[in-house]
Image (tube, rainbow, N blue to C red):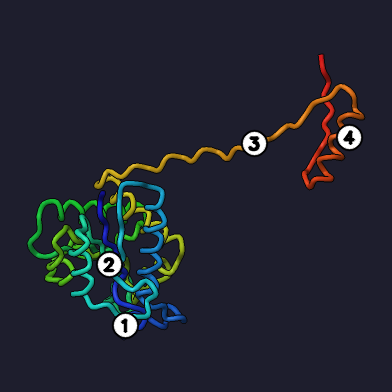
Amino acid sequence: MYKIAITAGHYRYTSGKRCLKKLDKNETREWVLNDRIADKIEQLLKGYEGYSLIRTDDTTGETAVEVKDRVKKANDFGADIYISIHHNAGVLGGKGGGIVAYTYTKVSAQTTEWQKELYDALIKHTGLKGNRATPLAKSNLQECRETKMPAVLLELGFMDSQTDVPIILTEDYAEACATAICEVIVKRSGLKKKSVEDKRSLYRVQVGAFYVKSNAEALAKELKAKGYSATIKEEAVK
């Protein structure tokens, strides 16, 4: 059983974590963007078997879950991969931005492979390459440092970027991100698609068949009197 840990970064009321007002009148919260993608990943993975998945954030967004608690939950679960979903800031209302994938500063080759494959898939599906000097970045992030499994933190666009905001707010972008992440998870974990369920069958019960119509009518009347549904069908006999 392959074990997957997904987390939507922050929570609904994290101070300052929202889209720039002049670019988004609703000032959409980062957690809302993160959670939407996490939810879509979960839905896509339901088409596969051979895995178990946990969310280490509060999926209602109402409670702040500390990073140390998220990490502990993933470690206790024995996850094989940890993916943290975020959206970035730092363009200060300017242009540019794009996707950045982070790992801890010292990681295994397996983690580096996860990082690159996730980044490449996200760029392929979204086109949001941006202008970051190091889109495959390393940083002393607690989530990536203290997890016992390969961990990648994804910054899926900038919430204060003139370029990114109109894109990251869309449903299509969230779908594309989830599709990219799910694609890599399935490939690297070897998950198999669920078999298509058999079509439903309808079973009919026949009580009798008569050459004389009056006999058929008499039986139909008797069945109806007893509360059964009865229909007479005429068929040509060769």
Mark positioned earlier in the residue sequence (3 or 2): 2
Name which residue type carries label 1. Answer: Thr
Q: Are marks 1 and 4 in contact (CB under 8 Å)?
A: no
Q: Nearer the viewer, mark 1 or mark 4?
A: 4
Q: Are marks 1 and 2 in contact (CB under 8 Å)?
A: no
User: Residue at the spot x=39%, y=63% of the render?
Assistant: 39
Say which element carries label 1: loop
Residue drawn 25% across the image and 50% down it? 2
- Give the residue at x 75% y 32%: 207
Q: Is residue 26 above or below residue 103?
A: below
Q: Nearer the viewer, residue 155 or 38?
A: 38
- Say whether disc 1 or disc 4 marks the residue closer to the N-terminus: 1
Q: Earlier in the sequence, mark 2 or mark 4?
A: 2
For residue 125, above or below residue 134: above
Q: CA distance from mark 1 to mark 2?
A: 16 Å
- Which label is found at residue 203? 3
Q: Residue 145's quadrant in the figure?
A: bottom left
Furthest-left residue in this view? 106
Q: Earlier in the sequence, mark 1 or mark 3?
A: 1
**Can you identify the residue that label 4 sits on?**
218
Check residue 155 in the rendering and tell me which mark sits there, or answer none. Answer: 2
Query: What residue is shown with label 1?
Result: 14
